């Protein structure tokens, strides 16, 4: 019974990691699976090893402990980005399939 509960918790947490991805055709969330290379809790240095150098970095103006880092995995003609959100240098969530680098908006 414990094993079932542990597996259910792991599956539940892994589902939260992806979050709602960017909208694809018809508003259906689109994911390329690249963000799955990152595990929750990794540092920005570990993310760089997995995905290469970042293409953009922005700190949350409302919470300086939170930052969004973009990693390009597309081509020059059709760029795609992973958005990785770190709090206190630990990954909290990552999504892929984005057409622009991440921003906390203005």
Image (spheres, helix red, strand yellow):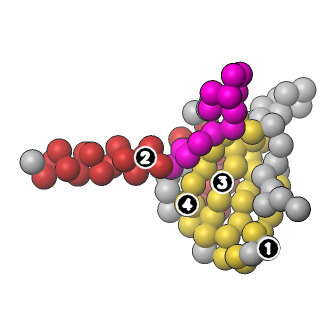
In percent of width and height, residue 86 lies at: 63, 64
79, above or below 57, in the image: above
Q: Along the line of sight, which residue is nearer the eye, 15 or 71?
A: 15
In percent of width and height, residue 89 lies at: 61, 70
Where are the magenta residues, as a range?
A: 17-30
For marks 3 and 1, give the one nearer the viewer. 1
Q: Which residue is mark 1?
A: 61
- Residue 79: which quarter of the image? top right
For marks 2 and 1, give the one nearer the viewer. 1
Tag 2 near tag 4, CB within 8 Å: no
Q: Which residue is mark 3?
A: 84
The crowd level at tag 2 (other Cα within 10 Å; few <14, some 14-19, many 20+) is some
Tag 2 near tag 3, CB within 8 Å: no
Q: Residue furthest front?
A: 26
Q: Is residue 5 left or right of residue 91?
A: left
Membership of 38 in magenta stretch: no
Alpha carbon separation for disc pair 2 and 3: 15 Å
Q: Is residue 43 left or right of residue 24?
A: left
Name the residue located 54 percent from the left edge and 44 percent from the top edge.
18
Q: Secondary structure at mark 4?
A: strand
Q: Secondary structure at mark 3?
A: strand
- Residue 90: which quarter of the image? bottom right
Name the residue located 44 percent from the left edge and 44 percent from the top edge.
15
Alpha carbon separation for disc pair 2 and 1: 28 Å
Q: Residue furthest left?
A: 1
Say the numbered circle drawn on residue 14: 2
Q: Is residue 16 left or right of residue 90?
A: left
For marks 1 and 4, give the one nearer the viewer. 1
């Amino acid at each position: 019974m414990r094993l079932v509960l542990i597996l259910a918790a792991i599956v539940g947490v892994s589902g939260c990691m992806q979050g709602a991805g960017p909208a694809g055709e018809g508003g259906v969330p689109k994911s390329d699976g690249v963000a799955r290379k990152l595990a929750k809790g990794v540092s920005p240095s570990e993310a760089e090893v997995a995905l290469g150098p970042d293409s953009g970095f922005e700190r949350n103006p409302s919470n300086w402990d939170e930052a969004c880092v973009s990693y390009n995995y597309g081509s020059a003609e059709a760029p795609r980005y992973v958005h990785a959100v770190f709090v206190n240098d630990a990954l909290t969530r990552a999504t892929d399939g984005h057409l622009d680098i991440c921003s906390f908006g203005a």
